């Protein structure tokens, strides 16, 4: 008894010593200079959505091994000890309900109508059985092929989740860049308006200008501070959103985004982008894998029209004492569902209908991918045109502000002309940042539509 307790205690201690397996999350370092590539890397490593889909894909791959196990020998063992009565029951015929540990017949050497006794005897049983798959006209191999295609589909679904996460991280990274850049625009505006207010007060004290200049400068400064407050809040919200995408919330350390919003001409045409999407889009590959799984399902269910062959072998030892009676068996087992109420016919028809549905879904997805690629390409071209126009507008408003400032300092212009020029310049500067952000998001959208951002993330 003491040895049993000691064994149990050792086993419990061993279990407690095994470390808990948990996903290894990556985090930012305090003061880290965060690039877009690093933000995408953190997102793919940490985000629960991606980890969930990859775990589902891993489970699907394990089902391939489960299906392949049918090709290997199946070995079973059994052992029983029963203390039971030996009362004869004659040649009674009955269907064993599964819990009656007796067989028909009478005791050897006993009377057919012997009386009932409550005395019990020992009954022993031990045995080993082996089954080996031989041939079944495609059921097992069809199931393996189906599970393999399902595993590929699950992997592609995980890739699609990663593709969406990359787009989300890219969009929010650019949003933070744009918010930080607009904050600098309004910080510069507040600095300029502060200097302008001071200059207006000096000139008013010297009776060079009227008091309206001071009030106008104060109002312009207050508006600039309000705009700066809104820009700072937008930056803080964008940072929280990016932290959430990278799954480093709620205690993300301070960091600095180091990339800049920029642009370059669009290379390639819509047809080339669509061809790239046809090769790289995970959701397209998912449906193709599901179509293969549906074809394998047809092969699997059609096998029920034919017999299944198995090799069997076994050994058993039974008796009421020792030595027990030994028995061996070996042979070929053939099973053939001759009639099952047309179940197989309906299963085949169902599998073919599912395969056709996937084909139609595949054609529909190709149409939607073409729409996504075309729309993203047009948005990217429009974004480039908007940037060029914003650059021209910003250059013009900069010249207007410079001229208005010179006129005001020379006494040829008034404060309203100067503040209007400053307001237009600030608006145009912010619009230029918005144009760069819109272009960057459109580019990320095109990369998402073609699936190229997924391969780019792997190459980083």
Image: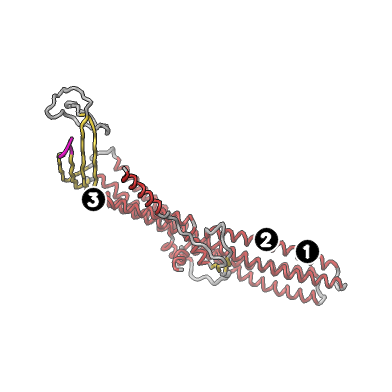
* Alpha carbon distance from label 3 to label 1: 87 Å
| Magenta span of residues | 318-323
Q: Tell which circle, 3 or 1, labels the residue nearer the N-terminal end.
A: 3
According to the image, label 3 marks what residue?
A: 73
Callout 2 touching callout 1 (CB < 8 Å): no
Image-based side of 186 in relation to 86, left or right = right
Q: Residues within 10 Å of mark 1 (few under 14, many from 20)?
A: some
Q: Residue furthest front?
A: 2
Asked whether 371 or 307 is in front, the reply is 307
312 to 430, vertically: above or below: above
Q: Tell which circle, 2 or 1, labels the residue nearer the N-terminal end.
A: 1
The tag on residue 357 is: none
Q: Quadrant of residue 58?
A: bottom left
The tag on residue 230 is: 2
* Alpha carbon distance from label 2 to label 3: 70 Å
Image-based side of 91 in relation to 2, left or right = left
Q: Residue furthest left?
A: 109
Q: Quadrant of residue 380?
A: bottom right
According to the image, label 1 marks what residue?
A: 219
Q: Foreground mark, 3 or 1?
A: 3
Q: Residues within 10 Å of mark 3 (few under 14, many from 20)?
A: few
């Amino acid at each position: 008894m003491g040895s049993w307790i000691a064994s149990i205690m050792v086993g419990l201690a061993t279990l407690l010593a095994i470390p808990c397996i948990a996903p290894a999350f990556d985090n930012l370092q305090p003061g880290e200079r965060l690039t877009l590539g690093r933000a995408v890397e953190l997102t793919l490593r940490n985000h629960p959505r991606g980890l969930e889909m990859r775990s589902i894909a891993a489970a699907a791959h394990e089902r391939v091994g489960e299906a392949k196990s049918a090709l290997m020998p199946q070995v079973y063992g059994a052992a029983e000890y029963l203390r039971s009565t030996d009362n004869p029951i004659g040649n009674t015929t009955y269907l064993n309900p599964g819990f009656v540990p007796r067989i028909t017949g009478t005791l050897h050497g006993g009377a057919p109508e012997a009386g009932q006794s409550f005395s019990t005897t020992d009954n022993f049983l031990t045995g080993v059985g082996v089954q080996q798959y031989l041939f079944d006209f495609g059921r097992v191999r069809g199931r393996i092929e189906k599970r393999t295609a399902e595993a590929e589909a699950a992997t592609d679904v995980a890739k699609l989740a990663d593709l969406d996460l990359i787009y989300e991280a890219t969009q929010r990274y650019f949003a933070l860049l744009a918010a930080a850049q607009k904050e600098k625009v309004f910080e510069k505006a507040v600095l300029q308006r502060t200097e302008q207010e001071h200059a207006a007060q000096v000139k008013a004290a010297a009776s060079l200008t009227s008091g309206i200049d001071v009030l106008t400068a104060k109002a312009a400064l207050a508006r600039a501070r309000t705009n700066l407050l809104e820009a700072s809040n937008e930056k803080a919200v964008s940072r929280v959103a990016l932290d959430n995408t990278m799954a480093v919330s709620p205690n993300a350390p301070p960091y600095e985004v180091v990339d800049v919003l920029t642009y370059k001409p669009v290379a390639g045409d819509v047809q080339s982008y669509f061809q790239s999407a046809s090769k790289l889009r995970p959701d397209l590959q998912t449906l193709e894998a599901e179509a293969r799984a549906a074809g394998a399902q047809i092969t699997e269910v059609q096998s029920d029209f034919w017999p299944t062959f198995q090799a069997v072998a076994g050994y058993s030892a039974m008796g009421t004492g020792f030595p027990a009676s030994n028995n061996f068996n070996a042979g070929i087992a053939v099973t053939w569902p001759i009639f099952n109420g047309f179940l197989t016919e309906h299963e085949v028809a169902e599998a073919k209908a599912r395969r056709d549905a996937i084909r139609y879904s595949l054609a529909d997805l190709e149409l939607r991918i073409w729409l996504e690629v075309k729309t993203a390409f047009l948005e990217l071209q429009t974004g480039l045109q908007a940037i060029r126009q914003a650059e021209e507008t910003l250059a013009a408003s900069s010249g207007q502000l410079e001229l208005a400032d010179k006129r005001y300092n020379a006494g040829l212009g008034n404060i309203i002309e100067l503040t209007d020029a400053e307001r237009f310049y600030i608006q145009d500067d912010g619009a230029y940042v918005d144009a760069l952000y819109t272009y960057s998001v459109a580019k990320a959208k095109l990369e998402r539509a073609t699936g190229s951002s997924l391969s780019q993330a792997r190459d980083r």
